[in-house]
Image (spheres, rainbow, N blue to C red):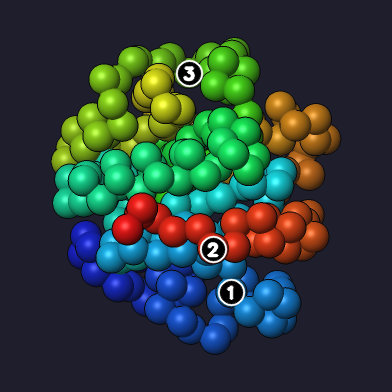
């Protein structure tokens, strides 16, 4: 893993995919159909379809360069992230319904972390209250944030966290113990009625959902300009 915040690294698959490498998990899985899952890009962000979407409209917002959490990304690019969400939320609601945004923010210490190697946010057509109920039932405690940009505090301090929010509500959950791999996917999978562990992208690859998501997001941009 890269030790340099905001750099291109050689150890994270997302970095290689965004750099156009021909040998990535995506290219090996889809073998050219489609050639790319990148929906749109801006200077520092990319919006892509999830490798194995849990539902139509399962998107990831990635930093183009190497960060471990959006807490770190927001320290450098808060204005760009805010503009992207303002624009994407409107397009998303028209197409898939109001989205919930989820993130496992990682850290260099990886203590209590799921070893996220490259910062990414999940956008899914779920109800925020339902996600919160599952996470609190799993023993996680939430704190309200005034806005997503408050995550930069965790990035600056190198602390792992879970984030769950929508247009109006922003919650952060402390990571005081090791959670299962792909924890947030497991939460979404439970809410979507999936049997454990069908939410695991290494077990079930939903190729048709990715292709349907790409078709419905054709022409999207990350800014209104």
Farthest front residue in view? 225
Judging by the rendered image, the residue that carries numbered circle 2 is 219
Residue 205 in view in this figure: no
* Rendered image: mark on residue 140: 3
Residue 15 in view in this figure: yes
Mark 3 nearby-residue class (10 Å; few <14, some 14–19, many ≥20) = some
Q: Position of residue 118 (x, y in %)?
A: 40, 57
Closer to us: mark 2 or mark 1? 2
Mark 2 nearby-residue class (10 Å; few <14, some 14–19, many ≥20) = few
Instruction: Assign a secondary structure to mark 2.
Output: loop
Of mark 3 and mark 2, the one earlier in the sequence is: 3
The residue depicted at 41 percent of the width and 36 percent of the height is 112
Q: CA distance from mark 2 to mark 1?
A: 14 Å
Q: Is residue 176 left or right of residue 94?
A: left
Judging by the rendered image, the residue that carries numbered circle 1 is 36
Of mark 3 and mark 1, the one earlier in the sequence is: 1
The residue depicted at 35 percent of the width and 54 percent of the height is 223
Residue 98, quarter of the rendered image: top right
The residue depicted at 48 percent of the width and 74 percent of the height is 17
**Depicted 201 relative to depicted 186: above or below:** below
């Amino acid at each position: 893993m890269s030790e340099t915040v905001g750099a291109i690294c050689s150890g994270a698959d997302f970095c290689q995919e965004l750099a156009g490498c021909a040998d990535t998990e995506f290219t090996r899985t889809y073998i050219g159909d489609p050639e790319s899952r990148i929906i749109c890009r801006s200077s520092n962000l990319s919006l892509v379809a999830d490798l194995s979407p849990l539902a139509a409209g399962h998107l990831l917002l990635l930093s183009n360069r190497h960060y471990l959490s959006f807490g770190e990304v927001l320290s450098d690019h808060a204005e760009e992230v805010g503009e992207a969400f303002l624009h994407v939320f409107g397009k998303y609601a028209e197409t898939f319904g109001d989205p919930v945004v989820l993130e496992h923010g990682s850290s260099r210490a990886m203590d209590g972390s799921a070893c996220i190697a490259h910062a990414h946010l999940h956008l899914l057509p779920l109800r925020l209250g339902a996600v919160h109920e599952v996470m609190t039932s799993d023993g996680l405690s939430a704190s309200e944030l005034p806005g997503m940009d408050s995550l930069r505090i965790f990035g600056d301090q190198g602390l792992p966290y879970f984030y769950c929010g929508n247009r109006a509500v922003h919650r952060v959950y402390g990571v005081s113990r090791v959670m299962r791999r792909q924890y947030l996917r497991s939460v979404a999978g439970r809410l979507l009625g999936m049997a454990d562990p069908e939410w695991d992208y290494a077990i079930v690859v939903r190729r048709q959902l990715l292709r349907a998501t790409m078709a419905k997001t054709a022409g999207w941009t990350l800014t209104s300009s």
